[in-house]
Image (cartoon, grey):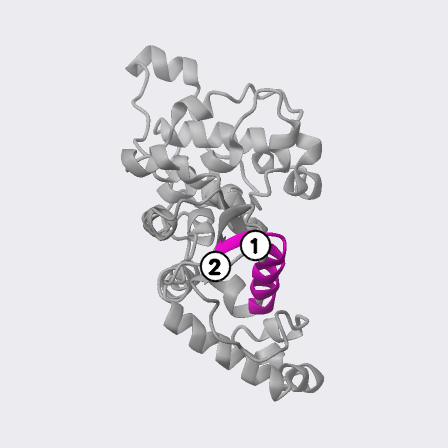
């Protein structure tokens, strides 16, 4: 992969002064990186590709250059390095400076336009058109369970027809999700059995509730058996994790606000989340809601 055509910082500053940073990037977080390289052994893309541009420190350097206008956010080479990152955050565990790499990466992706037609379609159909809408997601879940019941994926795999179908490669994946029929939604309150120890909220989620609804029900039952009142919002909400990871910052901020509003005023001691990705994303609400000071403080 060709290297990015960048300018020398010293010459640039001597000629034009320090450039103004892009408004969507928190430069304080970017400057936390000291480019020491202790993150390199932890990064799966660097270990596989052996390219500095696909390492955490290399991506931080490129984000800094893009933020200062030295590289365009829509440069295909910049986008390639940014979107090849899994955002797994393994680098954060090795970082002596406590760099919030995942947060910076999501800020950079929010500044980066969709790469191609497929990327635009995924953002429009999946992130904005399906996940935030419970009724549409319920229909999609019903169709998925119907195709599994009809053993259509297995038929496509055996016949080889999946190789020529759009998105047919997903037919080669093993089935996921609960096999039991979809049950009624959890009640707004599952009261504690015996002495009440605490009152908690349960985020049922979007895909989690559609694909693993049995897990949510068993969680609520286990919590109640152990003395917890379990509160479930009447409106099923999406936490916004996938939108945030993909750079759909406005959608992620809107869904974060909806999730916080769903649990506000419930006098909860904690919010329980079964999906690890949702729980991790909710811990980042203070950053995602930086444009909403009131909710940011509550987050």
Q: Is residue 138 magenta?
A: no
Q: Is residue 221 magenta?
A: yes
Residue positioned 70% across, 39% down in the render: 47
Query: Along the horizontal axis of the image, is 290 left or right of 206?
Result: left
Rendering coords of residue 263 (x, y %): 39, 50
| Above-or-below relation of 224 to 25 | below
Image quadrant where residue 63 sits: top left
Q: Which residues are magenta?
A: 213-230
Q: Secondary structure at mark 1?
A: loop
| Viewer-closest of 247 and 63 | 247
Rendering coords of residue 222 (x, y %): 63, 58
Image quadrant where residue 169 sits: bottom right
The N terminus appears in which quarter of the rendering? top right
| Viewer-closest of 91 and 1 | 91
Q: In the rendered structure, find residue 102 and report the number of the disc placed on it.
A: none
Q: Secondary structure at mark 2?
A: loop
Image quadrant where residue 109 sits: top left
The answer to whether marks 2 and 1 mark residues whose Cβ atoms lie closer than 8 Å is yes
The Cα atoms of the two marked residues, 2 and 1, are separated by 8 Å
The C terminus appears in which quarter of the rendering? top left
Rendering coords of residue 215 (x, y %): 61, 64
Query: Along the horizontal axis of the image, is 47 left or right of 79?
Result: right
Q: Residues within 10 Å of mark 1 (few under 14, many from 20)?
A: some
Q: Which residue is mark 2?
A: 205
Rendering coords of residue 108 (x, y %): 42, 38
Magenta stretch, main secondary structure class:
helix
Q: Which residue is mark 1?
A: 275
Residue positioned 54% across, 49% down in the render: 196
Query: Along the horizontal axis of the image, is 22 left or right of 97?
Result: left
Residue positioned 34% across, 39% down in the render: 289
Q: Residues within 10 Å of mark 2 (few under 14, many from 20)?
A: many
């Amino acid at each position: 992969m060709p290297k990015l055509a960048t300018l020398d910082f010293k010459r640039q500053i001597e000629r034009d002064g320090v450039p103004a940073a892009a408004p969507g990037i928190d430069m304080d977080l970017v400057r936390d990186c000291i480019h020491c390289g202790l993150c390199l052994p932890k990064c799966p893309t660097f270990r596989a590709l052996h390219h500095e541009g696909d390492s955490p420190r290399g991506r931080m350097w490129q984000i800094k250059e893009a933020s200062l206008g030295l590289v365009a956010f829509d440069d295909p080479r910049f986008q390639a390095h940014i979107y090849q990152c899994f955002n797994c955050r393994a680098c954060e565990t090795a970082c002596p400076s406590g760099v919030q790499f995942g947060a910076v990466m999501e800020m950079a992706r929010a500044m980066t336009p969709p790469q191609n037609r497929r990327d635009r379609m995924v953002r429009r159909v999946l992130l904005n058109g399906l996940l935030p809408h419970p009724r549409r997601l319920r229909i999609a879940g019903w169709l998925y369970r119907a195709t599994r019941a009809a053993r259509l994926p297995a038929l496509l795999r055996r016949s080889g027809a999946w190789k020529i179908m759009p998105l047919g490669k997903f037919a080669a994946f093993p089935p996921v999700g609960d096999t039991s029929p979809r049950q009624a939604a959890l009640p707004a309150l599952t009261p504690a059995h015996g002495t009440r120890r605490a009152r908690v909220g349960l985020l049922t989620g979007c895909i989690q509730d559609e694909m693993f609804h049995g897990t949510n029900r068993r969680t609520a039952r286990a919590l109640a058996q152990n003395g917890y009142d379990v509160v479930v919002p009447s409106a099923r909400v999406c936490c916004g994790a996938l939108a945030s990871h993909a750079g759909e910052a406005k959608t992620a901020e809107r869904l974060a606000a909806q999730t916080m509003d769903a649990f506000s005023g419930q006098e909860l001691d904690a919010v329980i989340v079964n999906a690890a990705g949702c729980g991790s994303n909710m811990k980042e609400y203070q950053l995602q809601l930086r444009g909403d000071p009131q909710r940011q403080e509550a987050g």
